Image (spheres, helix red, strand yellow):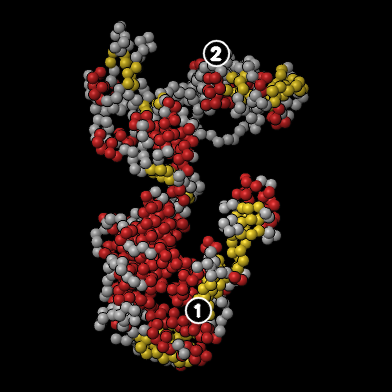
Amino acid sequence: PSNLALAVGPELRYTVLQWGDGRVVIGEGCLEAYAGTLSGAEILGTVTGAELVGRRFRPLFGYFSDTPRAFVVLGEDFVSMDEGTGIVQMAPGFGEDDQRACDAAGIAVICPVDDRGRFTAEVGDLAGVQVFDANAMIVDRLGDAGALVRTEDYTHSYPHCWRTDTPLIYRAMSSWFVRVTAIKDRMVDLNQQIAWVPEHVRDGAFGKWLEGARDWSISRNRFWGTPIPVWKSDDPRHPRVDVYGSIDELAADFGVRPEDLHRPFIDELTRPNPDDPTGVSTMRRIPDVLDCWFDSGSMPFAQLHYPFEHAKRFEEHFPADFIVEYVGQTRGWFYTLHVLATALFDRPPFKACIAHGIVLGDDGRKLSKRLRNFPDPEEVFAAYGADAMRWYLLSSPVLRGSDVTIEEKGLAEPIRLVCNPIWNTWYFLSMYANADGLGGRVRTDQTGVLDRYVLAKTRRLVEDVTAAMDTYDLAGATGHISSFLDALTNWYVRRSRDRFWRPVNAGATPSTPGVGGAPPDDKQDAYDTLHTVLEVLCRVAAPFLPFLTEAVYRGLTGQRSVHLEAWPDADELPSDPDLVEAMDLAREVCSAGHSIRKAAGRRARLPLSSLTVAAPGASRLLAYADLIADEVNVQQVKLVETVGELAETVLNVIPAALGPRLGARTQHVIAATRRGDWSRLSDGTVEAGGVQLEQGEFELRLRPSDPGSSRTLPGEVGIVALDLETTAELEAEGLARDVIRFVQRARRDAGLKVTDRIRLWIGLPDASAAVVEQWRAHIAAQVLATEIEIAALAEVQAQTTKPDDVFTAVGELSNGDVVVVRIRRLG
């Protein structure tokens, strides 16, 4: 009933048919879909949409037949042949495109539907019928009029109220607007002053939205909300509009000072129209309230009741340093803040903003309190802890604008990779400190290479996390902490374990002599270093893991709270970039060595003869060769400056980067690369098939000659090769290491302290017992055995009786041998 025009695509072609007593026009591309319906129709010819534009037609319903300039064919580019007939009915009161096209054609907006979605008296016999209920009635009337070609059901996406799930209708409404188009260019300029995370939002989602900004409809037809402070004359013969900016202005005109500015109280303020000499008309507030986004956009000044109060505070704190909301607010809160700040203050509303992605529920839809499509938070906190949930979100891609799904299984990862390493390191330190009666302190003058490395690494942690936080890159900050934890737990603590384990009275090391009964300096250095690192780590990680760091920090320092401490100052920690770079390379070498071992089935406790590092600058690892050898469990570390025969350099071209520059010659370069027709040039670039390639168009990679025993280092800087051959001597040492590990586990199971001395009996098959005998002294030193007896398995097994203070353990070594150990704690 509300259709006032038709739209065709000017560039599209339309078929004219004779069908019964009348003629039918249909899009040429839609004709096949209606072949059955139009069976028997005679094709009279074809025309372009442009030839139809301007033609008038008889309306299907006569309700608005006298509307000026209506019932005409319009040309619009949005019309397609994808569905329907290629001809679109236009109702300017119920569609954005419809209204725009009809406005341009001078066709008035007619809207015969009331606020409750029911037809008005303008459409006669349909009056009072809800629009969705009227569908069948309208179809029947079309059929009765002989105007119905075919009825058809469509399934398509339709807007629903997000609170009630009831369908919505588009309807033209009279509205009040902010003339955003007048300040659009300035809004675009001020946007460049904002630091966005992720950065692409500035010129992408937000920037593009600003460039296309239209005037903002700020009025809403609701009962509750902030009333629009506009009073209008109720008699159009005496028009007047008053806009109020303060309660004082209201009091001056209405003679009362309102206590409640909301409806219905504010609407009770009326007064005679000063422009009406008859004194009959009255000034009444318009019924509209403000769009709630206008309230949100007013937040910076409204929260302080500016400009009526707190002017100094507002001016000192505007623009805001930082805000955060999900990326959809580029069209919501971010936008309305920006509109009002530009219009009122000619400034951006905030200096920095994180526009995070959408948090999705386990059903893939946006997280919703109404749908409850997420794990119960209280259950998550009880099972994993609030820190795990916090880290899960802060470290996820959601803080870089991507979406993230809340999966309960993913919440276990922060526990395993972050929380447990921190807690276990604290537990390790406190356990040994309590056993020794020693404590650590904050110190940074240690001279040991491992201590200097982890302290310098801690300085870099502070620098990196500070830099990330300064740019609001929270996910990047968590990445730096995770990387540091690997260096701390899997390198420093692992490589320093013997220093903590060594008894206090074990005597001085040659390089750091002790005095009398005092612990060696090296051991105290280890305590002080780990204490210092944990103290700084807790302060750095406190914003991300507030509960865990609180517990560790208070136990470590005895202070009230880590959250009352200052952010660490990197300058208070030593800087040694060369050491950090070299030690990190040593760690990568060890990681590659372990990877080769695992793939080749060589257990970690089996010594191997050698490991080779072949890379430019490998000699800088000479100072760490013993450390690498001990970590990877090899007898020798070889360092060479070139990869030689261990690997070959291969060239990979990147077609997506080559194509725009080389076009058809890209395939020529790819073919030359495959047949080895390429060379490296002195400037670091590459020539392939006579074509010089630029940086970013290729990558050079190392291909190990023996992938089974070699690995490339990260960044393709070199090769690590491991000699996987074993000998009887190596197997013997490996067996001794297996025995040591078994005894250490038995000590733990027996409840011994790390410093307890023991008497030890070891029972093994004869052949293995003979091998282990050669390592008696080494085993005794490692397990703190002052007395040790290695005997045949049967002999130890035969000792069926035992005193109460003897602990017995039976197990199996990696070679399949059964082992029996008996342990007695010595006073």
Residue name at image x 51 percent, y 34 percent: 159
- The image's mark for residue 421 is none
Q: Is residue 207 above or below residue 276?
A: below
Q: Position of residue 253 (x, y in %)?
A: 25, 18
Within the image, what quadrant is residue 195 found in?
A: top left
Q: Residue furthest top?
A: 278
Crowd class of label 2 (few under 14; some 14 to 19; many from 20; radius 10 Å): few
Please name the residue that numbered disc 1 is placed on: 636
Q: Secondary structure at mark 2?
A: loop
Q: Is residue 79 above or below residue 351?
A: above
Q: Secondary structure at mark 1?
A: strand
**Residue 103 in sight:** yes
Residue flagged by tag 1: what amino acid is it? Gln
Considering depth in this image, is 53 or 499 the residue closer to the camera? Answer: 499
> Which quadrant does the C terminus fall into?
bottom left
Question: In the shown orientation, is residue 723 left or right of residue 548?
Answer: right
Residue flagged by tag 2: what amino acid is it? Thr
Considering depth in this image, is 276 or 84 the residue closer to the camera? Answer: 276
Please name the residue that numbered disc 2 is placed on: 67
In three-dimensional space, the C-alpha distance between marks 1 and 2, rounded to whole angstroms, equals: 97 Å
